[in-house]
Image (spheres, grey):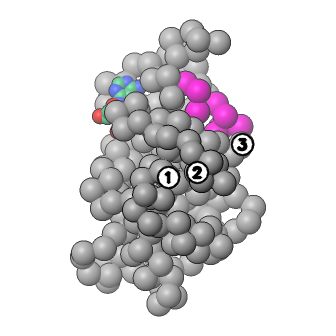
Amino acid sequence: PCHTHRMPFTGLGLNASLLKGVKELGFVRPTPIQAESIPVALAGHDLLAGAQTGSGKTAAFLLPTMHRLLERPRRATRALIITPTRELAAQILEDFNALAVHTHLTGAAVYGGVSMGPQEHAFRAHTDVIVATPGRLLDHASQRTVDLSGIEILVLDEADRMLDMGFIHDMKKIIALVPKQKQTLMFSATFSDEIRG
Ligand code: AMP
Protein backbone atom coordinates (compact mmCIF):
# COMPACT_ATOMS: atom_id res chain seq x y z
CA PRO A 1 0.00 0.00 0.00
CA CYS A 2 1.05 3.59 -0.64
CA HIS A 3 1.38 4.44 3.05
CA THR A 4 4.12 1.88 3.75
CA HIS A 5 6.87 4.50 3.49
CA ARG A 6 5.43 6.29 6.53
CA MET A 7 6.54 3.41 8.75
CA PRO A 8 9.63 4.27 10.83
CA PHE A 9 12.95 2.50 10.17
CA THR A 10 12.51 0.53 13.39
CA GLY A 11 9.56 -1.37 11.83
CA LEU A 12 11.68 -3.03 9.15
CA GLY A 13 13.29 -5.63 11.40
CA LEU A 14 16.84 -4.43 10.74
CA ASN A 15 19.72 -5.30 13.07
CA ALA A 16 19.92 -2.91 16.06
CA SER A 17 23.51 -1.89 15.35
CA LEU A 18 22.50 -0.85 11.83
CA LEU A 19 19.54 1.13 13.18
CA LYS A 20 21.95 3.00 15.44
CA GLY A 21 23.98 4.05 12.39
CA VAL A 22 20.80 4.99 10.50
CA LYS A 23 19.69 7.17 13.40
CA GLU A 24 23.06 8.92 13.63
CA LEU A 25 22.83 9.75 9.93
CA GLY A 26 19.56 11.51 10.73
CA PHE A 27 17.40 9.12 8.70
CA VAL A 28 14.00 8.91 10.44
CA ARG A 29 11.79 7.23 7.88
CA PRO A 30 12.70 5.07 4.90
CA THR A 31 12.35 6.73 1.51
CA PRO A 32 9.75 5.06 -0.79
CA ILE A 33 12.39 2.95 -2.56
CA GLN A 34 13.78 1.84 0.80
CA ALA A 35 10.31 0.97 2.16
CA GLU A 36 9.62 -1.13 -0.94
CA SER A 37 13.01 -2.77 -1.39
CA ILE A 38 14.24 -3.53 2.12
CA PRO A 39 11.50 -6.05 3.12
CA VAL A 40 11.81 -7.89 -0.22
CA ALA A 41 15.61 -8.06 0.07
CA LEU A 42 15.46 -9.11 3.73
CA ALA A 43 13.17 -11.97 2.73
CA GLY A 44 16.00 -13.21 0.49
CA HIS A 45 14.35 -12.49 -2.85
CA ASP A 46 16.04 -11.17 -5.97
CA LEU A 47 15.04 -7.62 -6.79
CA LEU A 48 14.76 -5.37 -9.84
CA ALA A 49 14.23 -1.85 -8.55
CA GLY A 50 13.62 1.34 -10.50
CA ALA A 51 15.36 4.15 -8.64
CA GLN A 52 17.11 7.40 -9.54
CA THR A 53 20.14 8.88 -7.80
CA GLY A 54 18.88 10.86 -4.81
CA SER A 55 16.08 8.40 -4.04
CA GLY A 56 17.98 6.76 -1.20
CA LYS A 57 18.78 3.70 -3.32
CA THR A 58 22.24 3.24 -1.79
CA ALA A 59 20.87 2.53 1.69
CA ALA A 60 18.09 0.50 0.04
CA PHE A 61 20.65 -2.08 -1.06
CA LEU A 62 23.27 -1.58 1.69
CA LEU A 63 20.98 -2.08 4.70
CA PRO A 64 19.49 -5.50 3.81
CA THR A 65 22.90 -6.65 2.55
CA MET A 66 24.59 -5.65 5.81
CA HIS A 67 21.74 -7.14 7.87
CA ARG A 68 22.25 -10.50 6.19
CA LEU A 69 26.02 -10.43 6.78
CA LEU A 70 25.48 -9.63 10.45
CA GLU A 71 23.03 -12.50 10.95
CA ARG A 72 25.60 -15.23 10.28
CA PRO A 73 29.15 -13.85 10.48
CA ARG A 74 31.68 -15.60 8.22
CA ARG A 75 35.24 -14.69 7.22
CA ALA A 76 34.87 -14.19 3.48
CA THR A 77 33.98 -11.58 0.90
CA ARG A 78 30.23 -12.19 0.78
CA ALA A 79 28.78 -9.10 -0.90
CA LEU A 80 29.85 -7.60 -4.21
CA ILE A 81 28.47 -4.25 -5.36
CA ILE A 82 29.10 -3.34 -9.00
CA THR A 83 28.73 0.30 -10.00
CA PRO A 84 29.76 2.14 -13.20
CA THR A 85 32.18 4.83 -11.97
CA ARG A 86 34.86 5.29 -9.38
CA GLU A 87 33.06 8.32 -7.96
CA LEU A 88 29.99 6.17 -7.32
CA ALA A 89 32.14 3.38 -5.84
CA ALA A 90 33.79 5.85 -3.45
CA GLN A 91 30.39 7.30 -2.48
CA ILE A 92 28.89 3.86 -1.82
CA LEU A 93 31.88 2.93 0.35
CA GLU A 94 31.45 6.17 2.30
CA ASP A 95 27.76 5.38 2.89
CA PHE A 96 28.70 1.82 3.88
CA ASN A 97 31.27 3.05 6.40
CA ALA A 98 28.74 5.44 7.95
CA LEU A 99 26.12 2.69 8.31
CA ALA A 100 28.72 0.18 9.58
CA VAL A 101 30.14 2.28 12.46
CA HIS A 102 28.47 0.14 15.14
CA THR A 103 29.25 -3.18 13.44
CA HIS A 104 32.43 -5.13 12.71
CA LEU A 105 31.69 -5.22 8.99
CA THR A 106 34.49 -4.18 6.67
CA GLY A 107 34.30 -2.71 3.17
CA ALA A 108 36.65 -1.66 0.38
CA ALA A 109 36.34 0.05 -2.98
CA VAL A 110 38.06 -1.34 -6.05
CA TYR A 111 38.32 0.93 -9.10
CA GLY A 112 40.73 1.91 -11.84
CA GLY A 113 43.20 4.77 -11.95
CA VAL A 114 44.91 3.84 -8.68
CA SER A 115 47.40 1.08 -7.84
CA MET A 116 46.14 -2.48 -7.48
CA GLY A 117 48.20 -3.40 -4.39
CA PRO A 118 45.97 -2.02 -1.61
CA GLN A 119 42.95 -3.45 -3.43
CA GLU A 120 44.61 -6.89 -3.49
CA HIS A 121 45.03 -6.56 0.26
CA ALA A 122 41.26 -6.03 0.61
CA PHE A 123 40.63 -9.35 -1.14
CA ARG A 124 43.28 -11.19 0.88
CA ALA A 125 41.85 -9.78 4.11
CA HIS A 126 38.40 -11.26 3.28
CA THR A 127 36.78 -7.81 3.38
CA ASP A 128 33.05 -8.41 3.84
CA VAL A 129 31.79 -6.00 1.18
CA ILE A 130 33.62 -5.06 -2.01
CA VAL A 131 32.35 -2.11 -4.07
CA ALA A 132 33.85 -2.31 -7.54
CA THR A 133 33.79 -0.91 -11.04
CA PRO A 134 33.55 -3.70 -13.65
CA GLY A 135 36.89 -3.23 -15.47
CA ARG A 136 39.15 -3.12 -12.42
CA LEU A 137 37.37 -6.06 -10.79
CA LEU A 138 38.04 -8.15 -13.90
CA ASP A 139 41.70 -7.01 -13.89
CA HIS A 140 41.98 -8.51 -10.42
CA ALA A 141 40.09 -11.63 -11.49
CA SER A 142 42.49 -12.22 -14.41
CA GLN A 143 45.44 -11.98 -11.98
CA ARG A 144 43.65 -14.40 -9.65
CA THR A 145 44.03 -12.02 -6.72
CA VAL A 146 40.29 -12.14 -6.07
CA ASP A 147 38.16 -15.01 -4.81
CA LEU A 148 34.49 -14.47 -5.55
CA SER A 149 33.38 -18.01 -4.64
CA GLY A 150 31.94 -16.84 -1.31
CA ILE A 151 29.66 -14.16 -2.75
CA GLU A 152 26.12 -14.45 -1.39
CA ILE A 153 24.77 -11.09 -2.51
CA LEU A 154 25.44 -9.37 -5.84
CA VAL A 155 24.28 -5.77 -6.26
CA LEU A 156 24.15 -4.19 -9.72
CA ASP A 157 23.90 -0.44 -9.16
CA GLU A 158 22.94 1.93 -12.01
CA ALA A 159 22.57 -1.04 -14.34
CA ASP A 160 21.26 1.09 -17.21
CA ARG A 161 24.31 3.34 -17.03
CA MET A 162 26.60 0.32 -17.05
CA LEU A 163 24.95 -0.88 -20.27
CA ASP A 164 25.21 2.63 -21.77
CA MET A 165 28.92 2.65 -20.93
CA GLY A 166 29.41 -0.66 -22.76
CA PHE A 167 29.93 -2.85 -19.71
CA ILE A 168 27.54 -5.62 -20.78
CA HIS A 169 30.30 -8.17 -21.49
CA ASP A 170 32.12 -7.28 -18.27
CA MET A 171 28.89 -7.68 -16.32
CA LYS A 172 28.28 -11.09 -17.88
CA LYS A 173 31.84 -12.15 -17.00
CA ILE A 174 31.40 -11.01 -13.41
CA ILE A 175 28.08 -12.84 -13.09
CA ALA A 176 29.87 -15.97 -14.34
CA LEU A 177 32.54 -15.59 -11.63
CA VAL A 178 30.15 -15.49 -8.66
CA PRO A 179 28.19 -18.50 -7.36
CA LYS A 180 24.97 -19.36 -9.20
CA GLN A 181 23.14 -19.53 -5.93
CA LYS A 182 23.08 -16.00 -4.58
CA GLN A 183 20.79 -13.05 -4.09
CA THR A 184 20.85 -10.42 -6.84
CA LEU A 185 19.68 -6.85 -6.24
CA MET A 186 19.56 -4.75 -9.39
CA PHE A 187 18.93 -1.00 -9.39
CA SER A 188 18.33 0.98 -12.55
CA ALA A 189 16.84 4.38 -13.33
CA THR A 190 15.22 2.99 -16.49
CA PHE A 191 13.95 -0.45 -17.47
CA SER A 192 14.43 -1.23 -21.15
CA ASP A 193 14.02 -4.73 -22.58
CA GLU A 194 17.82 -4.92 -22.63
CA ILE A 195 17.99 -4.24 -18.87
CA ARG A 196 15.30 -6.83 -18.15
CA GLY A 197 17.19 -9.33 -20.28
P1 AMP B 1 21.16 8.05 -2.79
O1 AMP B 1 19.98 8.08 -3.70
O2 AMP B 1 21.42 6.70 -2.22
O3 AMP B 1 22.39 8.66 -3.42
O4 AMP B 1 20.81 8.97 -1.51
C1 AMP B 1 20.57 10.35 -1.64
C2 AMP B 1 20.76 11.09 -0.31
O5 AMP B 1 19.68 10.83 0.56
C3 AMP B 1 22.01 10.73 0.43
O6 AMP B 1 22.63 11.92 0.86
C4 AMP B 1 21.54 9.92 1.62
O7 AMP B 1 22.39 10.11 2.73
C5 AMP B 1 20.15 10.49 1.87
N1 AMP B 1 19.20 9.51 2.44
C6 AMP B 1 19.11 8.20 2.13
N2 AMP B 1 18.10 7.62 2.80
C7 AMP B 1 17.54 8.57 3.57
C8 AMP B 1 16.44 8.59 4.52
N3 AMP B 1 15.72 7.49 4.77
N4 AMP B 1 16.14 9.75 5.12
C9 AMP B 1 16.86 10.86 4.85
N5 AMP B 1 17.89 10.93 3.99
C10 AMP B 1 18.23 9.80 3.35
55 vs 72, nearest the viewer: 55
The outermost residue toward the bottom is: 143
Spot occupied by residue 72 in the image (x, y as percentages of width and height): 65, 52
Instruction: Please tell me whether mark 2 or mark 3 is closer to you in this view.
Output: 2
Give the labeled residue for mark 3. 45
Disc 1 marks a residue whose amino acid type is: Ala
Spot occupied by residue 94 in the image (x, y as percentages of width and height): 30, 49
Badge 1 vs badge 2, beta-carbon distance below 8 Å: yes
Mark number, residue 175: none
The residues colored magenta run 35-43
Mark 2 nearby-residue class (10 Å; few <14, some 14–19, many ≥20): some
- At x 57%, y 45%, the residue is 192
Q: Up-down: is 145 above or below 112? A: below
Give the labeled residue for mark 1. 159
Spot occupied by residue 165 in the image (x, y as percentages of width and height): 40, 62
Spot occupied by residue 1 in the image (x, y as percentages of width and height): 64, 12
- Is residue 22 visible in this depiction of the protein? no
Give the labeled residue for mark 2. 195
Q: Which type of secondary structure does the marked residue at label 1 adopt?
A: helix
Q: Which quadrant is the C terminus positioned in?
A: bottom right
Does residue 42 show up magenta in the picture?
A: yes
Q: Which type of secondary structure does the marked residue at label 2 adopt?
A: helix
